[in-house]
Amino acid sequence: MAHLFRDLSLGHSKRETTPPPPPPSITPPRQSHAEDLPSPLGQLAAKLTDSDLTLTAYEIFVAACRTSSGKPLSSAANGSNSNSSSNNNNHYSSSSTESPSHNSPNTPAVQRSLTSTAASKVKKAFGLKSPGSGSRKSPGPGPGSGSGSGQGKPKRPLTVGELMRNQMRVSEAMDSRVRRALLRISAGQVGRRIESVVVPLELLQQLKSSDFTDQQEYEEWQKRTLKVLEAGLILHPHMPVDKSNSAAQRLRQIVHSALDRPIETGRNNESMQVLRSAVMSLASRSYDGSDSCHWADGIPLNLRLYEMLLQSCFDANDESSVIEEFDELMEQIKKTWGILGLNQTLHNLCFTWVLFHRFVVTGQVDLDLLSAADGQLAEVAKDAKTTKDAEYSKVLSSTLTSILGWAEKRLLAYHETFDRGNVETMQGIVSLGVAAAKILVEDISTEYRRRRRTEVNVARERIDTYIRSSLRTAFAQIMEKADSSRRASKNQPNALPLLAILAKDVGSLAVTEKQVFSPILKRWHPLAAGLAVATLHQCYGNELKQFISGITELTPDAVQVLRAADQLEKDLVQIAVEDSVESDDGGKAIIREMPPYEAEAAIANLVKIWIKTRLDRLKEWVDRNLQQEHWIAQTNQEGYAPSAVEVLRIMNETLDAYFQLPIPMHPALLPEVMAGLDRCLQYYVTKAKSGCGSRNSFVPTMPALTRCTMESKFQGFGKKKEKSPNSQKRNPQVATNGDSSSGIPQLCVRINTLQWILGEFDVLEKRIITLLRNSESAQVEDFSNGLAKKFELSPAACLEGIQQLCEAVAYRIVFHDLRQVLWDGLYIGDPSSSRIEPFLQELERKLMFVSDTVHERIRTRLITEIMRASFDGFLLVLLAGGPSRAFSRKDSQIIEDDFKFLKELFWANGDGLPSELIDKFSTTVRSILPLFRTDTETIIERFRRVTLETYKSSARSRLPLPPTSGQWDPSEPNTLLRVLCYRNDEIASKFLKKTYDLPKKL
């Protein structure tokens, strides 16, 4: 049998003592130290106690072993003296022969050489230890090894029979009675095999009340013996007994009567003859017609009796150790198979249960016992594949179910049962449980046989179940613990939220699982660690999902939980990946069981909500403060609005708050923050310039074309009130009510404000870089992409706004504020009496104010815009001044001199604008002025030619009226036509009358 079990080295110490003399009553051969399990070998219908079964088993043992029970033990000391009465008459002679092993030399010296000098071959095969020898113990609670009684060294048993009596704790008196009775039986039935003898019946016949200490002891013995007959022949017979069987009815009647009154058992007593007749009638029934008597070979009686015999192999003083004489005792125990109807298959099953049961009741700390049970179960697995007996399958199923149930009670929550200290025990229990499950599924389950066996991996499925179940249980426990921890620290500062604590604990549990349990479970499940972390990932994910669904805004607790969840997920996935390196699919199946928490995405969504809320507030603030803004420059030297300062202050506060958020993705979401702030600032700029007008808002509408007469200029002087319609033809968009928010001072403050904001962008962007550099989540590459940290919309809006406001200031000054001296005064009537001097005086005052008000970086641009507006206004007076104006060729010098004065105002003797800039913007005016000194015929001819060139064939019959383009040019038809319209001579008037029938007045 050595090849069946693990070959473990054993110590060679001997049993030093025997138990103290047992009391007359029979006690079970074990104590229940930790827990007990009901025997799966079957429950008896008869009311037989363990003591009753033990005595009966002993009687069977003595009967089966016969003379060999007096065989000297190989480990007994040579030359020991024996005063035991059991050595004198306890063994009896018979005609039965010894087993083949008994034909070998049997002297104590030979036996010592065979067994005492080497470890028992069976014990070695089982990995079992003898008392006092070294053994593997699992740390943990449980009884220690038994020790001697300390009352000296009582004599040692010298025969197998005496050893068995001591092991089963049978009193010497009872042993003596049984042996004497069997001796008489043997003497009276020479030549009969013990299997053909109904031992209890013969004992009833042989033993009288005088053989017992008192009548009560005799009656108790008789009742027990009769109940054994009832159990073996009626309740649990070898062959089923019909209810109408007369022998069975008689036996039952006798047994029940004996419970009230002892029966007479004399040889010639009638009641005894009736009993013998009934018993023999029932016991002689068999399937094969043999002469054997079947009185103790019915299941489960035979198995329970055999269980009692097997338990005697364990040392009374150290219940987790087998006795030194294990081999010899087991050899004798097997001789009971004939009476009990057993074979090697049933022995393997019973012995598996006894080993397992012994491990359980001795505190579950002796790993040798566990290993032996596991090894014996391997033999059972072989038997199960070849044995199809229904009764055996039933007992097998019951036994394995009991073992599996006990094992799974621990393995389905193995975190509660095992730790680093006793994890070796777990390996044995897993092996035992998996082996039991495989036999139950593969050799007993009909469902398994119907399915293709390749579809079922029993071991892997069981381990899968254990891992998932235990980790779910462990998760629930650490969650409860985390909740208690959170409640305890609720009033403490910086207390962690529940799921953050839980994430930390789950991470620790995963590490423990990987280090302690997964190496063991990997033997049966290659992805044990991966499966474990996938289970934990799912458990925590369920809690996290509920948490996320309840979050509406970014809070410190929410960020802590989500960051903890993200870190936990990374740790769990790392374990799964490492565990799956050698798997066929590279761990894809396990990873599929771990759908991402997307904690970073959840944080990002919350941050986006936070950003949107902040930006919405900023926009509301912009609206509210712009409504209250008066655009007065008295509050600061630079002349910008207070609202701009507040806008940038709040933007800085928003950036500070953003970078103070405890999130891991500041660089990733910074572009969104920047874009939002950029839009808010763009919104402010847009609001700041809105409603201030533009170039087209102030330029007056061009009057309809008319032609002049020679006297028109003289009419103008006498009837100035009639010229008033010209002053009313202004752009309806032009504000004339002196709006306080869009006057020149306010417009200058708006310009300064936008210029100040423009200068603050560099400061803001550098500050963002600093904040980003100090962020824990920033990486080197985050600084390489400068676009993410720059404003785009608002700088462009500022530049556009400054340009628009400069135009608005320029054209407002020229066409609105100075309207009286330009549009309504310059060259009205006689050009020589309404020259440009008044306009220049007023314009100079405006320029002085603007120069003192606007930011120096904007001053040149704004004055340039005013110059351009002045030049546009001058040309508009000349070419679209309405019927109040008319020019002769001699007026051309006045016009040219006035324009020269206008340019000199902006040049300011070299202190104003550069002459190159003045020349650039005066190009158009300088190209138009020569037309006013050109003769009318030349202008008309040039007009005809240009018009024909422009309109080609459509102009041959009649010259078309060229539209007003607003782009003045000496070669452009509309410009030439307008010079003619304002030419104060007859030739021009006739041409216009004939060609276009233009009126002289509007």
Image (tube, rainbow, N blue to C red):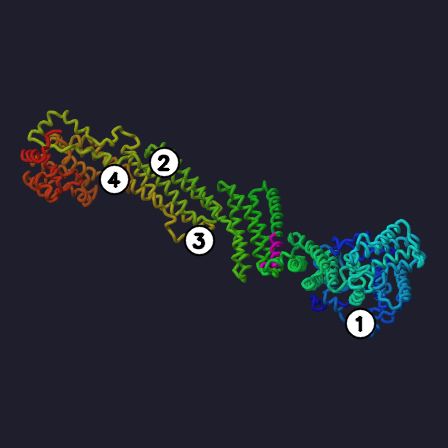
Do the residues bearing badges 2 and 4 touch, measured as CB atoms within 8 Å? no
Image side of residue 933 versus residue 583, left or right: left
Q: Nearer the viewer, residue 471 or 623?
A: 471
Q: Which sits earlier in the primary sequence, circle 2 or circle 3? A: 2
| Residue at the spot of label 4 | 862
Total numbered labels placed on residues in the image: 4
Q: Nearer the viewer, mark 3 or mark 4?
A: 3
Image side of residue 908 versus residue 942, left or right: right
Q: Secondary structure at mark 1?
A: helix
Whole-angstrom CA distance, mark 2 to mark 3, is 37 Å
Q: Nearer the viewer, residue 595 or 398?
A: 398
Q: Which residues are magenta?
A: 455-468
Which quadrant holds residue 647? top left
* Magenta-span inclusion, residue 493: no
Where residue 642 is drawn, which disc sits there?
2
Residue at the spot 42% in from the left edge and 49% down from the top edge:
770
* Residue type for callout 4: Leu
* Residue type for callout 2: Pro
* Residue type for callout 1: Ser
Q: Which sits earlier in the primary sequence, circle 3 or circle 1? A: 1
